[in-house]
Amino acid sequence: MTQPSSTDLLAVAHAATTLPLQQVFASGPGHRARLSVMQGVGPWHHHPNTTETFVVLEGALTLDFRSGDSVTLRAGHSLTVPTGLSHRSRASGRAVSLSLEVAEPQVVLEEEPA
């Protein structure tokens, strides 16, 4: 049997020189955890087959929704985006977060609003 090993997620995040970084660091039957480091604005998209839970480790991450609502998460905060809900991530500074989702999430990219 393989022994479990730990990952220093903040060390991986701090070593990232090219953004955005999207790195799966853990997975199991039907699920995965992904480390994200970003600055700027991500694309509008939705996931028809999964919720997406964001957990901010460092910095601040804003999630925008098509309704015009936005939620800003700071280190230690989390939010789950329901299946199918259009959203985008935005960070004015460097933000480090975890995303928890199904093992093979479908990502549907969307047009920018007019």
Image (cartoon, rainbow, N blue to C red):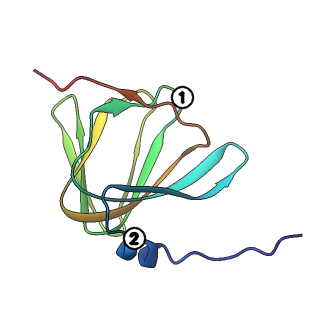
Q: Taking 22 as reference, is 83 above or below it?
A: above
The residue at which mark 2 appears reads as 13
Query: Percent x, y for residue 54?
Result: 40, 53
Q: Of residues 22 and 96, which is closer to you in this image?
A: 22
The secondary element bearing badge 1 is classed as loop
Query: Percent x, y for residue 77?
Result: 35, 62
**In percent of the image, x 62 and y 42: which residue is there?**
103
Q: Residue furthest right?
A: 1
Q: State how many labels appear.
A: 2
The residue at which mark 1 appears reads as 49
Q: Taking 43 as reference, is 29 above or below it?
A: below
Real-space CA distance between mark 1 and mark 2, rounded to the nearest whole angstrom: 27 Å
Q: Amino acid at mark 2?
A: Ala
Q: Taking 34 as reference, is 45 above or below it?
A: above
Quarter of image, res 46 = top left
Query: Percent x, y for residue 36?
Result: 40, 58
Say which quadrant the N terminus sits in.
Answer: bottom right
Quarter of image, res 113 = top left
**Badge 1: few (under 14), some or many (20 or more) residues near its Cα, within 10 Å?**
some
Q: Amino acid at mark 1?
A: Asn
Q: Earlier in the sequence, mark 1 or mark 2?
A: 2
**As drawn, is 3 to the left or to the right of 114?**
right
